[in-house]
Amino acid sequence: MSDDQARDAAAEAERDRLVVMPAIRAVVLAVLYLLLRADLAPRVLVGVTVLSALAALGLTAGDRVAIYMPMVPEAIVAMLACARLGAMHSVVFAGFSASALRARVEDAEAKLVITTDGQYRRGKAASLKDAVDEAVSGQPSVEHVLVVRRTGIDVNWTEGRDLWWHETVEAASTEHTPEAFDSEQPLFLLYTSGTTGKPKGIVHTSGGYLTQSAYTHYNVFDLKPETDVY
């Protein structure tokens, strides 16, 4: 390759770097934005109605909520809704026993338990609601059990206490005025495993946890706003 050809190739490569690649990237981002925007309204609406539903159940800032669910989207929505209401959520692994759930509900004095009718284990539906019924029996703090229909299996039902997620959310308002909270507002309650004794709850605050999350993304995952889309 002659010097002139080498210079032309280098110039073309530089043009691709400065013009073509940014243009392709812009098109890709535009398409992603349109796809996200098309799906954004119903997702936001669901989040708002869940907020309204929990507020209608009497949940207020400072209350505790136990979330005993498998890996379903409603689990994430429930956590975010609790955070926006200023209520402290405690996630309990869906593989834990009824006694393990009971210990955490009792210690937190949970006002609400959110769960599913069941979960899938090796392709078969296994009940979660039965464990919740056992865990909340005789618990004076628990006012309601909100149940997501996950598997469609038959479950025992306590009228007045147990509520279907879909019915409660569908009946909720699509408007909610959020409240501002201090950075030290408790965000969630995380319990130790309890293998060496009674589970001990650790409180994470809104400001502290979010600051640590931002720090981790920036320095550990190396996500930078100048170079990464997230």
Image: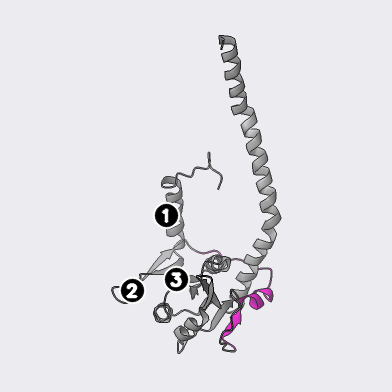
Separation of residues labelled 1 and 2 (CA atoms): 25 Å
How many residues crowd mark 1 within 10 Å: few (<14), some (14–19), many (20+)? Answer: few
Picture coordinates of residue 229 (x, y %)?
Answer: 56, 44
Residue position for label 1: 212
Q: Secondary structure at mark 2?
A: loop
Q: Which residue type carries mark 1? A: Gln
Picture coordinates of residue 18 (x, y %)?
Answer: 60, 27
Residue position for label 2: 194
Q: Which mark is residue 183?
A: none
Give the number of marks: 3
Q: Residue at x 50, y 70 (%)?
A: 122
Q: Which mark is residue 93?
A: 3
Residue 60 in sight here: no
Picture coordinates of residue 209 (x, y %)?
Answer: 43, 59
Instruction: Give left or right: position of 159 versus 93.
Output: right
Q: Which residues are magenta?
A: 160-181
